[in-house]
Structures are given as C-alpha cells and as structure tokens.
C-alpha cells in the first residue's frame, strides 16, 4: 500500500538542487474525487468517475475545436509528490528500481499524463473520464490523442531506424 512520504528501506533520496525556472505556467486546475494518494487510483480508467478540467483565462480560448476529439492527453503537475527519490521500491517487496524505470508519481519533475475520454464541455471546463490525480492538481497542457493524426510528411530514410538493432 502507498503511504504518504514514506521512505522504504531499499529506497534512496538525494539532496534537492537549487531550482532553475523553466517558465512553466499552469493553465488550469483538475477536479477529481480524490484528496489523498491512498484513495487515488494507480491508473485512470475510461469507465472511472467523470472529472472536471477547468481551463483558466486566457488559455480557455485554446479550447476551440477540442470537441472534435473523443480522447485527449492531459499533462499535469503532481504538486504533492516527493521529488528527491532516485531509487524506489514501489511494491514494498525489497526490489529496488531507478525512478526513470517506473511510472511512479515520485519524480524529479513530477509531470503526470493520462489519456482521457472527453464526455462533455461546459464553457471552459472539460468533463473527462480516465484521470488518476488528486483534486486540485495543476494543469500543464492538453493535446488531442496522437492516434487521431496522420503524419504530415511521408517517412524519410532513418525515421524507422530508431531502436532497430
């Protein structure tokens, strides 16, 4: 079970470096039924509860055309997550893994992503299913499901070579 800010025996935290501002702007706020990590699902489900994504002004203008999409990618800032763990034992089984090999919310830059189903729009608020974040989570960005797009240009030599042996 997940416990708030617990450091398990096999985990390792590091000293947090001085922050360098990347100019990140929260464009909205996410409203969900969950107020504690203990209650929040590990992954969102498309049959989960309807949640609300409030988009702030002037960013609400950027919602034009979003109703054309059934699925959206939501990027958000996991504002209540630890940021100092480099090694984690997520299952409390003694196995230790590096933070970058996990989908844990505990990350140096705790950016969360979810693919959600768009179920409605009320002004500058999107009604969605599929989130897995706490109530009040800051919104970073919204993008249509990438599968809804056709590549703009034909493939060029080398496009498919990434990761090939």
Image (cartoon, helix red, strand yellow):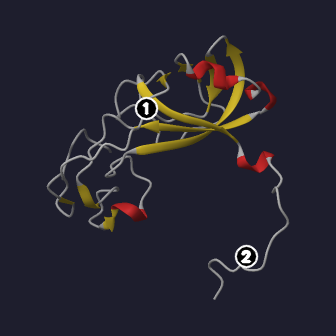
**What residue sits 67% from the left and 37% below the top?**
72
Q: How many residues crowd mark 1 within 10 Å: few (<14), some (14–19), many (20+)?
A: few
Residue highlighted by disc 1: 25
Tell me where residue 57 sits by quadrant.
Answer: top right
Is 10 left or right of 1, judged from the image as shown? left
Q: Is residue 163 positioned above or below 88 on the image?
A: below
Q: Is mark 2 in CB contact (under 8 Å) with mark 1?
A: no
Element carrying mark 1? loop
Quarter of the picture holding the N terminus: top left
Element carrying mark 2? loop
Q: Position of residue 49 (x, y in %)?
A: 59, 24
Residue 130 in view = yes
Q: Position of residue 2 (x, y in %)?
A: 31, 44
**What residue sits 60% from the left and 30% below the top?**
48
Q: Position of residue 25 (x, y in %)?
A: 43, 32
Tell me where residue 73 sits by quadrant.
Answer: top right
Residue highlighted by disc 2: 160
Is 144 left or right of 80, judged from the image as shown? right
Q: Position of residue 100 (x, y in %)?
A: 39, 62
Q: Which is more foreground, mark 2 or mark 1?
A: 1
Q: How many residues crowd mark 2 within 10 Å: few (<14), some (14–19), many (20+)?
A: few
């Amino acid at each position: 079970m997940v416990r708030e800010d617990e450091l398990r025996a096999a985990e390792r935290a590091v000293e947090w470096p001085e922050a360098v501002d990347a100019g990140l702007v929260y464009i909205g706020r996410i409203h969900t039924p969950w107020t504690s990590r203990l209650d929040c699902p590990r992954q969102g489900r498309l049959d989960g509860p309807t949640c609300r994504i409030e988009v702030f002004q002037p960013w609400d203008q950027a919602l034009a055309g979003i109703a054309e999409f059934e699925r959206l990618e939501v990027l958000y800032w996991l504002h209540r997550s630890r940021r100092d763990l480099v090694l984690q034992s997520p299952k409390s089984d003694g196995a230790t893994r590096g933070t970058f090999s996990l989908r844990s919310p505990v990350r140096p830059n705790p950016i969360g992503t979810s693919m959600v189903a768009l179920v409605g729009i009320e002004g500058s608020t999107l009604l969605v299913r599929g989130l897995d974040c706490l109530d009040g989570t800051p919104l970073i960005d919204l993008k249509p499901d990438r599968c809804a797009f056709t590549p703009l240009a034909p493939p060029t030599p080398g496009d498919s070579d990434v990761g090939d042996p």
